[in-house]
Image (cartoon, rainbow, N blue to C red):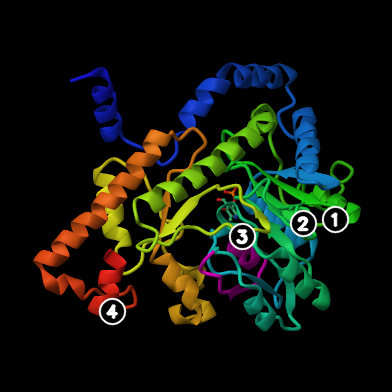
Amino acid sequence: MSGNQTDRSQSESQPVPFLDLGSQHGVLREEVLAALGRVWDSGAFVLGPEVTRLEEQIAQYCQTKYAIGCASGSDALLLALMAYDVGPGDEVILPSFTFFATASAVTRLGARPVFADIEPDTFNIDPLQVQRLITERTRAIIPVHLFGQCARMDHLLQIAQAHHIPLIEDLAQSIGAEWNGRRAGSIGQIGCISFYPTKNLGGAGDGGMLTTNDERLADKLRLLRVHGMKPRYFHRIVGINSRLDSFQAAVLNVKMPYLDRWTAQRQANAQRYEELFAVAGLTDTLKLPVALPQARHVWNQYVIRVPYGQRDPLREYLTQAHIGTEIYYPLGLHEQECFAYLGYRPKDLPNTAQVAREVLALPIFPELSPAQQQRVVACIAEFFRGQRRQAVLVPNLLLRTTPVGHAIPDAQCRAVQQ
Ligand SMILES: Cc1ncc(COP(=O)(O)O)c(C=O)c1O
């Protein structure tokens, strides 16, 4: 076997991890350890100069006047709602398709989450649904910029301004994303960032930040994160303990200058998937993620939709081939057990219910190589070729069922499989 053939067959059978933080960590090791050493020697472990520096960098990056560090993205959402005194009797509108923390921040304050359905192409909150759900009890709207792409902020801003309701942006997954040239976190009244390790700018543990252009809100958020205490042991309001620690900030300060390069790599990977899926003839079989022209998409996740009940078998096939995938998210929030008391039925938010049964996130991390992406697409193509062969041998297989149990006709199924 020639050297080239060996290389090819090796890369054809190499595992493709869903996420590979190790390669990034290897490159940054010395820089990060030096920064951690400086924090250790300084003894300033909570807030402190590293946190202040990060706050300045993030404010500049997100094009806001202020940034306030806190312990996590979940706490950022909680603090943002606390800054607006959200509590029992209030309603907060948010998408039904997002990570749990967006909703739990609302319920932890005794308020009611009101779920708005999403646009299935972008996975983001549908402004028309938001409009319908506003009542006199609505105290905030939380658009989530899911998977790296902003929600339709111009439309949402119009609705929010017309009703004098604050917009709290959840940009946990979307630092650096833009809508019509404006950075996520600078468009609404408050932005909430997560530095969870899998995010585009991820720490070595939990961390979060709030962004705002409003000085009064910035002051209140700074107070809320330290038990409402100012000066020491004098509590003006009841806050929580949610401070960003200096070790996390030091890691993030090292990573910050690399963020744009990593984002460009993610964008190139998304582009490459699109080309590879087109060449493989899979663009009718699968629904590829849509990047809107108004958006700067930063691709925290590359999420395809696999219709007609094929998502789980495909995922199993890829797992067998050692290709990592994830399901964000297997249920809409309105279908979660803990929110049963809200009284939603799955079909109340049909786009969310459908999408949750079809989504499959593929590897998109910056260091993913073209050969790895080729392998992912080749394996997906192989899966669907296998399905077609089976369908020819066992004609009944052509009558599949959709996730909600309706039979779909042969012709449609054939079209899907070709
Ligand atoms: C959309 C969204 N909101 C909120 C959060 C919460 O962030 P954290 O994990 O830092 O608490 C996350 C993170 O997973 C998220 O993806």
Closer to the chain start, of discs 3 and 4, is 3
Q: CA distance from mark 1 to mark 3?
A: 31 Å
Please state which of the two labelled residues, at mark 1 or mark 3, is closer to the viewer: 3
Q: Which contiguous range is marked in magenta?
A: 102-121
For the point 88% across and 46% down, the residue is: 230
Q: Quadrant of the C terminus?
A: bottom left
Q: Are marks 1 and 2 in contact (CB under 8 Å)?
A: yes
Q: CA distance from mark 3 to mark 4?
A: 30 Å
For the point 70% across and 22% down, the residue is: 39
- In the picture of the structure, the residue carrying the numbered disc 1 is 217
For the point 68% across and 45% down, the residue is: 176
Left or right, 360 with respect to 32, comes to left
- In the picture of the structure, the residue carrying the numbered disc 4 is 408
Pinpoint residue 63: horizontal percent, then vertical percent.
80, 46
Closer to the chain start, of discs 1 and 2, is 2
Q: CA distance from mark 1 to mark 2?
A: 8 Å
Q: Secondary structure at mark 1?
A: helix
- In the picture of the structure, the residue carrying the numbered disc 2 is 190
Left or right, 57 with respect to 132, comes to right
Q: Amino acid at mark 1?
A: Leu
Q: Is mark 3 within 8 Å of ligand 1?
A: no
Left or right, 35 with respect to 339, comes to right
Residue 292 is labelled as 3
Q: CA distance from mark 4 to mark 1?
A: 53 Å
Closer to the chain start, of discs 4 and 2, is 2
Q: Nearer the viewer, residue 216 or 362?
A: 362
